[in-house]
Amino acid sequence: MIVDLVDGTYELFRHFYGLRRFNKGADKPLGAVAGVLTTVLQMLDEGATHLGVATDHVIESFRNDLWSGYKTGDGIEPVLRAQFEPLEDALRALGVTVWAMEELEADDALATAARVAGDDPRVRQVRIWTPDKDLAQCVRGDRIVQVDRKAKAVRGEDGVRAKFGVAPQRIPDYLALVGDSADGYPGIEGIGPRGAAALIAKYGPIEDFPQDALGERQNLALLFKDLATLRTHASIPAEVDEIRWRGPTDRFAGWTERMGAPKLLGRVQAAVEARRVAHV
């Protein structure tokens, strides 16, 4: 089987700003939610059977206590922020497993689910649907891969090495050195992507760097590495059998009306029928 893990927060932002190109600022209250549901239904149409979506129910996490500049919910447009919880509820009505994260982040949930599915011998491949750089650390060979819709790329271990110049397990070290503007930490001044890859190739993880490699900046680099390291033991229902899609709940029809997207009901009914026929 193939397990599909979706970054719901990224998808919500992607659809919200994608719609902005056409709606001239007249944002529909649930427009981005309908967009994410459309994407998930497309995955189901294409044969997805085991699927989980992670969301940032609360933008702030334990990492904000580690670094004062870490990302927060400040600056998120109210019309977008108001769609976070409706997205979670609409996905649950669709019958999709949702991990709505509070103390940890959506990325930690995806990392945990990828580890659990990757350890299951029944699973042929795990696909993590997000372009976020930090999720590249979860890639393992071609068994756990990262799907980047934006770049239209599927990256296994070789793809991660080609993009970043380091192995997946060294992504936290790489991000600690170059920084991650999306997450709000700057990295180590004067070290760019090539320099970071060269240092990691020479010395390995930051813990093994000689003292003169970073000097007094070593502890700061280790802090940034901690920020970049995803937690893989989140307390979420991530076992493969728990994320198998079994069809929508009775509430989904009401959600299609609320979203002003009645065609989604027909699509989900078609997906259910296709599975019924396939198992006859």
Image: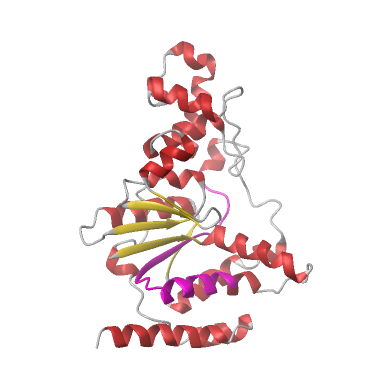
The location of residue 32, given as percent across then percent down, is 62, 69
Residue 161 within the segment the image draws in magenta: no
4 vs 243, nearest the viewer:
4
Picture colour scheme: secondary structure
Residue 51 sits above or below residue 181 on the image: below
Residue 266 sits above or below residue 77 on the image: below
- Which quadrant of the figure has residue 21? bottom right
The location of residue 104, given as percent across then percent down, is 47, 50
144 vs 64, nearest the viewer:
144
The magenta region covers: 35-62
> Which residue appears at 65% of the width and 62% of the height?
81
The location of residue 210, given as percent across then percent down, is 42, 14
The location of residue 53, given as percent across then percent down, is 45, 64
- Which quadrant of the figure has residue 33? bottom right
> Which residue appears at 69% of the width and 56% of the height?
76
Question: Residue furthest toward the top?
Answer: 212
Residue 205 shows in this picture:
yes
Residue 235 shows in this picture:
no
Residue 44 within the segment the image draws in magenta: yes
